[in-house]
Amino acid sequence: MTVGPFRLQVLGVESLAVVSLPGKGGEALDWLATALPAARNAGGAKGGCAALSAGGCNSTAVVVPESALRAVAPPPGANVDTPWAALEVSFAKRAVSDALVLASLAPVLSSAKVRWRALPAAQAPCLLLIREEDLSAAGVALVRAGHAIGPAARVCPPRPQEDTAASGKNAEHVGAWTLTRREEPVGKTVEEPDEKGPLRLQAPSGVYVEVRLPQEGAKEQASCAGIHSVVEVSGGRQMSVRHRVVDFRPPTGRVLCTQVKFDKEVMAAELSYPHGRFRDEYIEAWSRIHSGPMAALELISEEPSVGPSRTGYWIFCGSRFGRVIGLPVGQGIASGTCCGSLEQLEVCLGGASAREELHTRYEAVWGDIERPGRLRIREEVWSKSKSGDLIYDQATGVGGTLTFGPSEVLHCLPNGVKQRWRIRDWGFDPFRPGGPLPAPL
């Protein structure tokens, strides 16, 4: 019998160690009583698992933060196994025995070749230990099985560093693209959008936005923004990798890696890679509608700020613009926990209002650059009535005022909010007719 879905939460931010000692537990507990206070006095061992006993045949094992090892050396003869992460398992609907939890999760973790072990937890939710280096694989497998795991900042791959050579690597991908077909799985067409279909704007610096608003009959928001890179793998093949910085959907822990084939102005095939049980297998075809010029801005601050800081990108290409803003992956409700869908996330979290957060903290819009200084909305995520409205008009003051620095743009909105945008690409000035070209950082 299996139950679920479960919510798994990585405890603390510090890696754990399993320290095994031969014999009974007296020596282990004596060391523990010394090492933990010493680690706390040094600023470690905060939050998460402080210590858990895990006995074995003719030995005693304790689970401690790695800072305890640095504070006080383990006794002679101790075996130290590190690094591990502790995860607490909960079930929104009712209390479930550890046996049922393990019966449901063990096949998922083992089939993904994740190294794990259960821990005794008296009068507490079920606790698991998972190897730190297996945490991402565990997250992907658990999400595919319908569970939720967080925080996403511990499970998802980290944001890549900026690549000064990105413009050369991204050359083929740069431009404004519209989705023409999506198959998922390969061979089953699930999308053939019209001219208002998903729009992707890819800048030379690597930043991109995808405005993917639900078409008729669909409900799920899928807009996102982030960083694109081209990496070379074995055999000289080049892979397209997209790291989502902002996403209207919960993160899944997966790396969006695709093989791309070009046919003139058509990205004829963007095929998920590699194939495997724990990856989405899909193929998308995109058609380029503009190759440039391009400008791209990155949101770096808002004043006054309400709640966690938002981020996002505003990109311009030819006669199109697109903007996606929201909480960075790893923050908030919708992006703070890895899960397969928004609906599944709400089930796992027991009704937490992810949708309300999306409506109040996330934005996605695309439209036309009628001329520099005049931008008109085609589609806006939360209001169809805004289609046709001006989002910015320098001549009349619609949309607020802009102040330009050598590497930043300050946007003072009509409601008084001040947004600071970092210039990432500046091939033309979309805000001022004949405006000067600031030097991006």
Image (cartoon, rainbow, N blue to C red):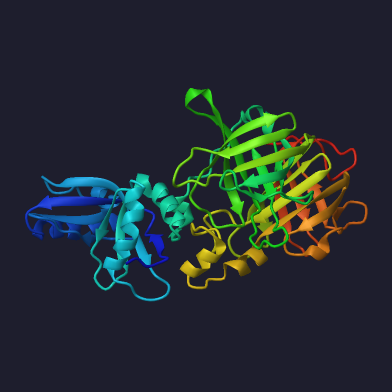
Looking at this view, name the residue that lies furthest to the top: 236
Q: Where is residue 37 in the image (x, y as percent from the top left)?
A: 25, 59
Looking at this view, name the residue that lies furthest to the right: 395
Q: Is residue 134 left or right of residue 429?
A: left
Q: In this view, does 346 lie to the left or right of 85?
A: right
Q: Where is residue 80 in the image (x, y as percent from the top left)?
A: 20, 46
- Residue at x 26% of width, y 73% of height: 123
The answer to whether residue 234 of the structure is visible from this angle is yes
Q: Quadrant of residue 148 in the image?
A: bottom left
Q: Position of residue 251 (x, y in %)?
A: 53, 54
**Closest to the observer: 439 or 193?**
193
Q: Quadrant of residue 371 in the image?
A: top right
Q: Position of residue 405 (x, y in %)?
A: 76, 43
- Residue at x 49% of width, y 57% of height: 338
The quadrant in which the N terminus is found is: bottom left
Vertical relation: 85 (above or below) 256: below
- Residue at x 45% of width, y 60% of height: 146
